Amino acid sequence: MPTLGVNIDHIATIRQARRGVEPDPVAAAAIAELAGADGITVHLREDRRHIQERDVRLLRQTIRTRLNLEMAATPEMVAIALDVKPDYITLVPERREEITTEGGLNVQAQCDRLGKFVNQLQGAGIPVSLFVDAEAEQLQASARTGAKFVELHTGTYANAKDETEHKRELEVLTKGGELAIRLGLRLNSGHGLTYWNTKPVAQISGMEELNIGHSIISRAVLVGLDRAIREMKVLINP
Ligand code: PXP
């Protein structure tokens, strides 16, 4: 059964709404860990719309589980990552105008460029995960970069409009997971996972970690962060 990485970006989104100091994602990370989070995930975006460098540096010093830094493959981010040394890095595509990450990386189209970033980061002892759609070409290209992990983009599955689409997209993720593992890649998943759609993804063979943010933080606003995380943990790992 997979572990749970809690994405706390949205705690920072609320803080940034007032450009103030609360709620502090560093405090949220401590509560998340006490409630059973197996890792803390943050996305340091180029435009710093939610998580700030200060958060990443303090989290590095304070969390007791694993710090997964999501970032774009750019020289600026690599310099920060090499300095902070998160436990692992997830490379994601990033466009300023998007509301959230809107799809997987096109690894096939930039295999050499991404391979250089993977080499540099993994050479410094930081395992790299590539956020990709569960497509054969993308998974094969991911393996060619030398990255240790892929994170399957579950957004399309999460947006399924009916039972037929849901089944089809789950099959895509299951097949993608099988191929990733055959290619020697370790397997994570995330994006758009909720209390209603996570269970089948958690049951995909070889799944190691699910990264979940929006749904947990949304529930936390109503029931508290501790309870929201405990309820997700039971779903993933009954
Ligand atoms: N995984 C990746 C690579 C992401 O970019 C995000 C969103 O930042 C997540 C997981 C979490 O997605 P959600 O907030 O929809 O749970």
Image (cartoon, rainbow, N blue to C red):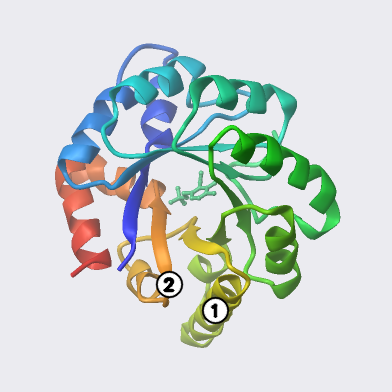
Q: Is residue 154 visible?
A: no
**Residue 104: % across, % down:** 66, 56
Q: Work out whether residue 15 can be spotted.
A: yes
Which quadrant of the figure has residue 47? top right
The answer to whether the residue labelled 1 contacts the one labelled 2, judged by CB atoms less than 8 Å apart, is yes
Locate residue 113: give its quadrant: top right
Q: Is the residue marked 2 within 8 Å of ligand 1, measured from its CB?
A: no
- Quadrant of the frame with the N terminus: bottom left
Residue 226 vs residue 20, the one in the foreground: 226
Q: What residue is disc 1 on?
A: 178
x, y (%) of residue 194?
36, 60
Q: Mark 1 vs mark 2: which is more N-terminal?
A: 1
Residue labelled with disc 2: 206
User: What kind of element bears circle 1?
Assistant: helix
Residue at 54% in and 29% down = 44
Front residue of this view, candidates 62 and 28: 62
Q: How many marks?
A: 2
Q: Position of residue 205 (x, y in %)?
A: 42, 77
Q: Quadrant of the C terminus?
A: bottom left
Q: Residue furthest top?
A: 20
Q: CA distance from mark 1 to mark 2?
A: 8 Å
- The structure residue drawn at horizontal position 40% and vertical position 62%, both measured from the top left corner, is 208
Which amino acid type is shown beneath numbered disc 1? Glu
Local SS, label 2: loop
The residue type indicated by label 2 comes to Gly
User: In the displayed image of the protein, which residue is found farthest to the bottom?
Assistant: 164
Q: Is residue 74 above or below residue 161?
A: above
- Dot 1, crowdedness within 10 Å: few (<14), some or many (≥20)? some
